[in-house]
Amino acid sequence: MPGISTNVPATIIVMTDTATHDSAPRDHDALARFLLPGAGVRGVRVHLDDTWAQIRARGTDLPAAAVELLGEAAAAAALFTGHAKVDGRLSVQLRGTGPLRTLFAECTAADTLRGIAQVEDGEPARDLRAMGDGAVLAITIENPAGPGREPVRYQGLVPLESDSLAGAFEDYFRQSEQLPTRILLAADERRAAGLMLQKLPGDAGDDDGWARAGALFDTLAPAELLDWPAATLLHRLFHEESPEAMGGRPLRFGCSCSRERVGAMLRSLGRDEAEAAAEANGGDVRVRCEFCGEIYDFDPGQIEDLFATPAQTVEGPAALQ
């Protein structure tokens, strides 16, 4: 995602189905990249099944609107790794003051995804403009900087001027990145998916290529995005543009939590606060990862050891989880 700020905070084609494309195998839990060379447009399609089921299983009590937004955020996080240089992790995060307090999804360089939504006081609205005063939506990339050094962090703040995540992200790429972009996101109880088109930088493609691709994009319904395999989607939407597959990769659920990272978090609280937490819990500290449910227990001796040894930088695992 070149150029992300370091300031932290219609033509319709009607076709009859063919046996060749309808019999194409479904491509679950995958990212696929493609090119529309004549139009000068690149694209990414993401479809999540088992990955989404595992993320969804950690939020069984979420209202329907929160479930849809979490699925869309997970699909978006994966989509944005299709063209951005991500050696660490890319995350999408929304913080609001309404019922939906936190929405977070992350995709790593190891092709793992995780996500969480936190809801308080009622049913959240699907309209992002109702997220409350001070709501913030951000795209963040963290790349490793080498042993003993803090990760390099890039963050872009996304204006909340649209009623949907897809619209908000389109606004971001158009206004902040000067990159014409179309995004469609969809999620239900079983699947989450996303499709992104971007105009290639420079003068690639013919004069009306971007408008033509956008008109075809507008014919795609969310249910079709969820139902169609990548090959079917490309053929039905863009067959006249001679789409070229540019490779892809599988996606899976994974969490980056570890005992070492939890220990580093406790150290960051300070001895007094860590010991106070242990005393309030009968002598031990118990930390539960909200993403995967893993539980980490620290007894008094282990808490003492955390503060008896020099602080060390905790490196991520060789293969990000």
Image (tube, grey):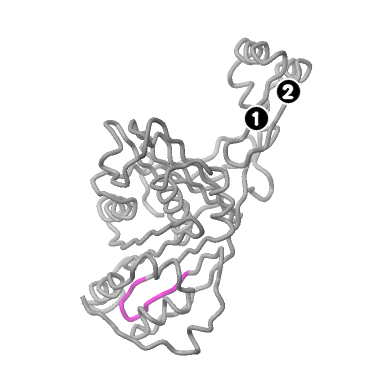
Question: Is 265 or 145 nearer to us in this picture?
Answer: 265
Question: 194 left or right of 98?
Answer: right
Does the magenta run of residues contain 35?
A: yes
Question: 117 left or right of 264?
Answer: left
The magenta span reads 33-41
Question: Is 267 or 298 nearer to us in this picture?
Answer: 298
Q: Residues within 10 Å of mark 1 (few under 14, many from 20)?
A: some
Q: Is residue 196 above or below residue 96?
A: below
**Residue identifier under label 2:** 298
Does the magenta run of residues contain 293?
A: no
- In the rendered image, residue 141, in percent from the top left (x then y), is placed at 47, 46
Placement of the N terminus among the 4 image quadrants: bottom left
- Residue at (33% x, 68% y) in the render: 221
Element at badge 1?
helix
Q: What's the amino acid at mark 1?
A: Val
Tell whether label 1 touches label 2 (CB within 8 Å). Answer: yes
